[in-house]
Image (cartoon, helix red, strand yellow):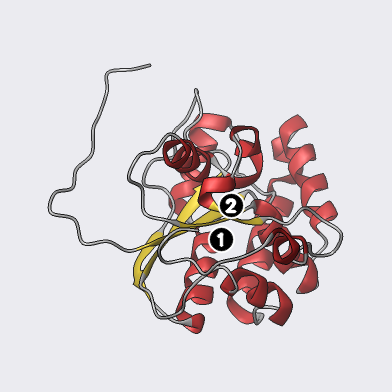
């Protein structure tokens, strides 16, 4: 148990399994390092810091499975999206228009479809709606050896209450398909990222005395 998160049991976590998929909704401190390709580099690295005793704001990680569930429950077939993504890896020119059509469909779905009730309840059950949170993108393509995607996706600060939290999650998902991310992906990976790949980190907001970023020369 961590401040900002209600107590929970293994039984309750098990009940969060959705559509016979992996839970996909988990306290940051419980995410494993080999879950990188489900939760993204940001969530995975924050979890490592928490497990090693660093003073990191508590929170919840949402895997890309949650994004996929949202799309499936909203009427889009994730298998079809993945198929176009795979074809783009083989021959981008032949399916480039399909890639952008799918991106537009996904963005329209995120904007216009309501959050499925049970999926929303599963997420909110591990949060306290009276707290302010930072809702942060954690794409599985971020922070890799070949590309960082730094600053390409969104994070929303001072988020409070059910509607604001759910809206912020959708904004993180939508940012996977923004122009910045597309241009960066085309430059560094040779193709836009079509398959739903956005994890989300929801952390308790803090008011620090000092804050900053450290840049290193390389690994």
Disc ID at residue 144: none
Element under label 2?
A: strand
Q: Quadrant of the rendered structure where residue 190 is?
A: top right
- Residue labelled with disc 1: 173
Q: Earlier in the sequence, mark 1 or mark 2?
A: 1
Disc 2: which residue = 198
Which residue is painted at 63% across and 48% down in the image?
Answer: 197
Q: Is residue 52 left or right of residue 34?
A: left
Q: Is 142 displayed left or right of 123 in the figure?
A: left
Left or right? Give the position of 101 relative to 179: right
Say which residue appears at 52% left-offset and 50% top-offset: 28
Pick the quarter of the image with the C terminus: top left
Element type at marker 1?
helix
Task: Verify CB contact (< 8 Å) between mark 1 and mark 2.
Answer: yes
Q: Residue 11 placed where, x, y %?
A: 75, 63
Give the x, y percent position of residue 171: 49, 67
Nearer to us in this view, 164 or 29: 29
Residue 40: quadrant of the picture: top right
Q: Is residue 215 visible?
A: yes
- Residue 189 placed where, x, y %? 57, 31
Q: Is residue 101 visible?
A: no
Residue in the foreground of this view, choosing between 204 and 165: 204
């Amino acid at each position: 148990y961590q401040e900002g998160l209600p107590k929970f049991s293994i039984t309750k976590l098990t009940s969060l399994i959705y559509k016979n998929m992996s839970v996909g909704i988990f306290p940051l401190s419980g995410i494993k390092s080999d879950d990188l390709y489900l939760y993204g580099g940001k969530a995975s690295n924050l979890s490592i810091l928490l497990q090693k005793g660093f003073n990191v704001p508590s929170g919840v990680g949402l895997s890309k499975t949650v994004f996929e569930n949202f799309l499936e429950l909203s009427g889009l077939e994730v298998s079809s999206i993945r198929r176009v993504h795979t074809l783009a890896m083989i021959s981008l020119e032949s399916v480039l228009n399909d890639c952008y059509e799918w991106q537009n469909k996904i963005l329209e779905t995120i904007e216009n479809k309501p959050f499925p009730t049970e999926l929303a309840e599963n997420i909110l059950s591990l949060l306290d709606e009276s707290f302010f949170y930072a809702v942060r993108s954690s794409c599985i393509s971020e922070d890799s050896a070949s590309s960082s995607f730094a600053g390409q996706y969104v994070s929303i600060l001072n988020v409070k209450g059910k509607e604001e939290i759910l809206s912020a999650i959708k904004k993180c998902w939508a940012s996977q398909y923004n122009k910045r991310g597309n241009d960066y992906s085309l430059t560094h990976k040779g193709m836009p990222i079509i398959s739903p790949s956005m994890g989300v980190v929801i952390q308790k907001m803090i008011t620090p005395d000092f804050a900053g970023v450290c840049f290193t020369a390389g690994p």
